Amino acid sequence: MLVRYRYRIDPTAAQRQALARAFGCARVVYNDALAERRRASQAGEPISDTEVQRRVITQAKRTPERAWLAEVASVALVQACQDARRAYRNWFDSLTGKRNGRRVGRPRFRTKHGRQSIRLTRNGFAFRGAKLYVAKVGLVRVRWSRDCPRRRPV
């Protein structure tokens, strides 16, 4: 079972900029992954999850027009790729009847407007005292509204 906790953070101006960069890069990778899956399905070629990730992250970082993807934590980019995979799986499972609940529509591209978010695995963050370390962002001050079970009390 997965558990999610939400806390308010107080990033500095530089950290806000780094987080905004991470949000934008994750959105671009998500959209590229959706586009790659659509292109592959229209061409009739099967494409694996690792191949999509290799094309939209690893190879894209080597091109001059997407070299800025290397400025953010790769954990956020991989999770964005996994989110696109999950969106497609939910859609296909909904079409075939494997998924319970209401029908899910085709995955949509993300926009700059609206809620911006990234997902990080355990490799992308760590608790350091009363602060939270986020990869390639730094130590961010957190307003602890309640104790996080994984964090040691200060």
Image: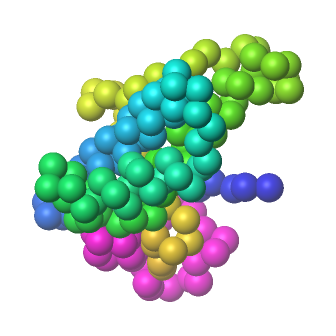
Q: How is the image coloured?
A: rainbow
The answer to whether 96 is drawn above or below residue 63 in the figure is above
- Residue 5: where, in percent of width, then height? 59, 55
| Residue at 64 percent of width and 75 percent of height | 150
Q: How many marks?
A: 0
Residue 29 can be seen, yes or no: yes
Residue 22 can be seen, yes or no: no
| Residue at 56 percent of width and 82 percent of height | 153
The residue range painted magenta reads 128-154
On the rendered structure, is 91 left or right of 123?
A: right
Look at the image and tell me in which quarter the N terminus lies: bottom right
On the rendered structure, is 86 left or right of 108?
A: right
The answer to whether 149 is drawn above or below residue 16 in the figure is below
- Residue 112: where, in percent of width, then height? 27, 31
On the rendered structure, is 25 left or right of 83?
A: left
On the rendered structure, is 65 left or right of 105?
A: left
| Residue at 63 percent of width and 54 percent of height | 4
- Residue 143: where, in percent of width, then height? 40, 63
- Residue 78: where, in percent of width, then height? 48, 57
Does the magenta-highlighted stretch encompass residue 85?
Answer: no
| Residue at 42 percent of width and 79 percent of height | 130
Does the magenta-highlighted stretch encompass residue 153?
Answer: yes
Q: Is residue 17 or residue 73 the one in the foreground?
A: 73
Q: Is residue 81 or residue 131 the one in the foreground?
A: 81
The answer to whether 76 is drawn above or below residue 142 in the figure is above
